[in-house]
Image (tube, helix red, strand yellow):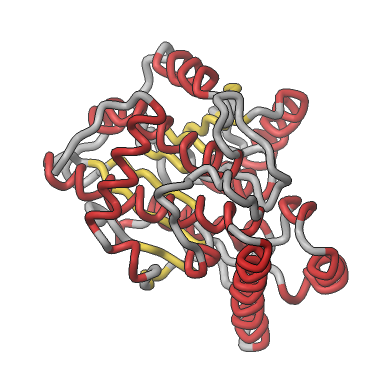
Amino acid sequence: MSPLSAARAALRVYAAGAAVILAQLLRRCRGGFLEPGFPRQPDRVAIVTGGTDGIGYSTAKHLARLGMHVIIAGNNDSKAKQVVSKIKEETLNDKVEFLYCDLASMMSIRQFVQKFKMKKIPLHVLINNAGVMMVPQRKTRDGFEEHFGLNYLGHFLLTNLLLDMLRESGSPGHSARVVTVSSATHYVAELNMDDLQSSACYSAHAAYAQSKLALVLFTYHLQRLLAAEGSHVTANVVDPGVVNTDLYRHVFWGTRLVKKLFSWLLFKTPDEGAWTSIYAAVTPELEGVGGRYLYNEKETKSLHVTYNQKLQQQLWSKSCDMTGVRDVTL
């Protein structure tokens, strides 16, 4: 990618963000974001990646409030004990725990899955929430560009390693669910199948957007695989909107200034950003329904290229090669 192309990518990403912020402002002026009502979820188990901060923390907290057994998967050991204690105290739910999982390390992901399976409990909901945003060029422990490796490949591997448990836990009328968090930046992304690692010319904006596009393609193909085998597992992808979290430390200084001054008006709170993830995880309206892109608790259309089944399969096959997952062709 040339410097000019990198500049275009940055402008597209900020334009997409500005459009979402404008829509959120208009909604605030018309009454704001009202918390949906969610049904209780006793005896169900959920894993939430990145659950110690931001949207992930709010998601874990609300699921615990609904009575779920929540496992927070994260790499912030120092914060974990405090977070778990706080959620337990706020929700009066003792079934909240933390298991270490570094999504930038395939070994760590495999160790997490081993530890979780040793608990001998079911898994009804997997929320692929963790991520990094517009970080400087750096690599994961396995040598992948960090946005692609952590945001996308880490969740690709985690989901595939947990699919057998999700299949065993789902039942007719009570499907297990995979919920993956993408972003509106996927609308301005390009998937470079010849350079998924953004090695030719790095753009943090393009790399971030590409990882979010890859998550949408992954979700749609996963749903096709699950439907073809007749399993009681569904996969949906959610867009939280522009949310006031700590992910903005690497963005343009002007964006950070706007966030600092006007986040109360323009940005969603972490709780508001989590509602679509929770909706996808528990609402009866989505029982048995997968392959949907959800925004503000409603289905909407994703980028047209995400419905290209050939591209879905190509990305899936490449991801299998990168992670050692057995490929399945429809």
In the rendered view of the protein, which quadrant contains the N terminus?
A: bottom right
Residue 61 lies in quadrant: top right
Q: Where 220 falls versus 67 (above or below)?
A: below
Please give the count of numbered marks on the rendered protein.
0
Residue 32 percent coordinates (x, y):
63, 78
In the rendered view of the protein, which quadrant contains the C terminus?
A: top left
Query: Is residue 97 among the parts visible in the rendering?
Result: no
Give the residue at x 51% y 17%.
107
Residue 117 percent coordinates (x, y):
39, 16
Residue 229 percent coordinates (x, y):
12, 39
Give the residue at x 51% y 50%.
211
The answer to whether residue 162 is left or right of residue 246 is: left
The answer to whether residue 102 is left or right of residue 303 is: right
Q: Where 45 falls versus 261 (above or below)?
A: above
Q: Where 117 falls versus 171 (above or below)?
A: above
* Residue positioned most to the top: 118
Residue 150 lies in quadrant: top right
The answer to whether residue 22 is left or right of residue 173 is: right
Residue 13 lies in quadrant: bottom right
Viewer-proximal residue, 12 or 84? 12
Residue 329 percent coordinates (x, y):
16, 39
Give the residue at x 42% y 48%.
194
Query: Is residue 25 among the parts visible in the rendering?
Result: yes
